[in-house]
Image: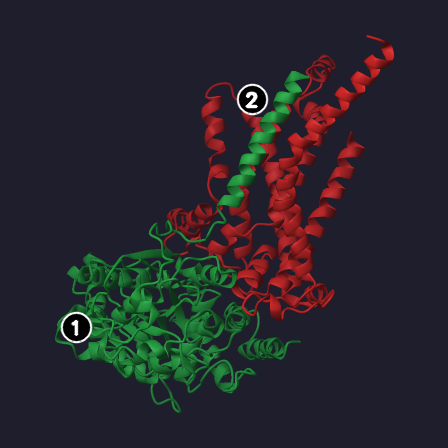
Amino acid sequence: MAPHLRSIRCSLMHRSDRRLSILMVAPAIVFILAVFILPMAVSLQQSLTNLNMTTGESAAKFIGLKNYVKALRDPETLNSIWVTVSYTAVTVSAELVLGTVVALVLDEVIGFQRLVRTTIILPMMTSSIVVGLIWRLLWNADYGVINAILQEVGLPRPFWLGPGLAFSSVCLTEIWQNTPFVVLLVLAGLSSLPEEPFEAAAVEGASYLQSLFYITLPLLAPVFLVILLFRTMFALRAIEAIWILTSGGPANETMVYGLHIYREAFAYFNTGYASALSWILLVMMAIFTFLYNRALQLGT
Amino acid sequence: MKAKKAFFALSFVLMGSMLVSACASPGTPTESPQPTQAQAAPTQAQAAPTQAQAAPTEGAVPPVTIVVSSGGFGNNMTVGIAMYKATYPDRQVNMIVMPHDSMYDKLMTQLTTHTGGVDCIPVEIPINLQTMNPFLEPLQPYIDKSPDLNFGQLLPPNIPAARYPYPDGQIYTIPVRQGVDLLHYRSDLFTAAGVQPPTSFEDMVTVAQKLKTPGLYPLTMPLKQGTYGVNSFLDVYHGMGGAGILNKDLKQAALGPTAVKALQWMIDAVYKYQIVNPTDLNSQIEDVFTNMEKGRAAMGVISSGNIYNLDPDIVAKGGSIGYAELPYDAPAAGNGGVYWAYAFGINKDSQNKEGCWDLIKYLASNAPQVQMAIQSGNGPSLGTVFTDPAYLASPFSSAAAATKLATTYALAKDPSPKYNQIVDIFAAEESSALSQKETAQQAIDKATSAINALLSGS
């Protein structure tokens, strides 16, 4: 075939390939638009109105940014943001440290690795509602197992879900449930570390701790950042276990932002306001994601 | 190239099938499969009802879908619905059970989006009727053609509560289950201590302190931040002469010195008199039942519609439960605590309104009301149950006298469309005061200010 005809034929084949490719991914794009983009657009539109589901869309009026201004001035909203940020900071830090320690220990375990690893991840596999129910019984001040053990050893029996301790108790519950996630990711990271730096360090006479702090942890930095990103996003949205344990009390000590949004949307049906609160949460999560990604890029 | 095409083809098939399945099942948030028999074809009875509906209608009878909540309500209605099916074997009923705590949320989501297939809607009256009424059928036309239903025989608080606007608007619901608050007490412990059920709040403290022993708290109340905590406050508040959280026109908070006095009494009960276990600050109603069942408390403030069983070991040692009116101080003339009721209304979008009416009318009639009370401890909404020989012969009738008395004095929750928000605002301040983070006066002042701001729309 003549060269110019060959190139036309190639170009036509590329064009038809491209059309075929677009056709093949079209359902995925439609799905994403329908399930993700469109609801977000509707939610954004609703956040600019005073929509209440009990009075319906016909009664809703455009109010601009009033919902956002109200949210940022509302003491309840500000309290829930503070509680959520504190909850996230405490639980994510604790999970990262504890999960890393457990992963380092598990990495050294020789026998029963699979059994140990399966047992370790059980809390993560349990539904948050079930976790809340289990821990509500465990934390019970009068007949919970924890206080029963404390009583046996002669220690006082705290009111775990009462004033002053409720926040710590819900944090501990979250840490118990989600540390296995950190363990799994760190274990995966440890198994992919190159051996050469450790061999070189051994040759130089470095101790275990020196290897850990100067080689292992720095090499695991990208893994830590991924863990921080995921755990932060999930902790910012936590609701279920906290609802079961304390319903946000006592005195709003554990009223996290997610619960606050839930009440506005589904107890009071203030859909417009709840949408604005949701967008504020989205912005918060986007800021955290941006910061973590920057840190990741700088690290690599 | 071939692999690339194969990959795209596979993703096309997967995404396409997901899209098709998402479009094909709009999804209803109900918890049971939808009825399979078509409900669209109206029966003859729906077209022009002219006679009483007691007799089965001729021809095919479409099934009725009714929602109940888990727990006591669901258990009670199961008895009544089983009787209905036994009485009318040709009528099908599809009962959907929703978790109690989220039933209102789920129903409102269904009603506002018109996505449900539910015919008979449960409504907590009067509070939830304020928001649910636009989605319900007015019932007067149905009542007018049903001489077998005597609306006037309902217990007095039910009559205004079933209406919107409260108390003398149109009838939208028929009550089938009612509760008022009683003092449940261990009559054996009272006899041993030589005391009688307290009649005033001062008496309550005196009696409680005589009953105090290691491992036994004299009084148990649900004080967890939320609806139950607020109900406990209202029990004390009503007994001290307070009315509602809101004033009569529902436009402002009405929490004055009596509210401060009631909240202070609750704080003192925990910390000063130490007659209430501090751990009750996280107690829900189930915890109060457990405390009574297991003999950890001598008295409990519990709704009459809730029944529990004493631990058999305690019964074997002579343990028994008595029921009395809650204590009260002047100017209150009695104290029935908080009145609540569950009623059924007909969904405006229902395809089987007559079938639903048949069912709810039946559930509110004497025979099922008696059996629901006897078999599952339902709090009857019908006054005639309290004089029925079968009911009086049952163990549940031991609470009958106290319940009837309490019904006279019980006060309904404020019938405001924003009641849920008002309760949450008050619950947070109440919890703060009970946690000793602020005084009773500070809590009431902050609650008043926040509630007024909510009601004024600012």
Contact check, label 2 and label 1, Cβ < 8 Å: no
Q: Colour of chain B?
A: green
State left or right for residue B349 relative to residue B301. right
Q: Which chain is red?
A: A
Is label 1 in a helix, a strand or a loop? helix
Residue type at the position of mark 2: Glu
Mark 1 lies on residue: B391
Indicate the colouring scheme: by chain
* Towards the viewer: B151 or B386: B151
Chain ID of residue with mark 2: A
Chain ID of residue with mark 1: B
For the question of whether residue B135 can be seen, the reply is yes
Query: Residue A263 lies in what quarter of the image?
Result: bottom right
State left or right for residue B393 relative to residue B424. left
Rendered location of residue B383, percent (x, y): 24, 80
State left or right for residue B150 relative to residue A293. left
Rendered location of residue A279, percent (x, y): 68, 55
Looking at the picture, does residue B204 appear above or below residue A53?
below
Query: Residue A9 lies in what quarter of the image?
Result: top right
Mark 2 lies on residue: A108
Which label belongs to residue B443?
A: none
- Furthest residue toward bottom: B331
Rendered location of residue B77, percent (x, y): 28, 63
In the picture, which quadrant includes the N terminus of chain A? Answer: top right
Query: Residue B304 lies in what quarter of the image?
Result: bottom left
Mark 2 to mark 1 CA distance (whole Å): 70 Å
Q: Residues within 10 Å of mark 2 (few under 14, many from 20)?
A: few
Looking at the picture, does residue B6 appear above or below residue B343?
above
State left or right for residue B318 relative to residue B172. left
For the question of whether residue B213 can be seen, the reply is no
* Towards the viewer: B99 or A175: B99
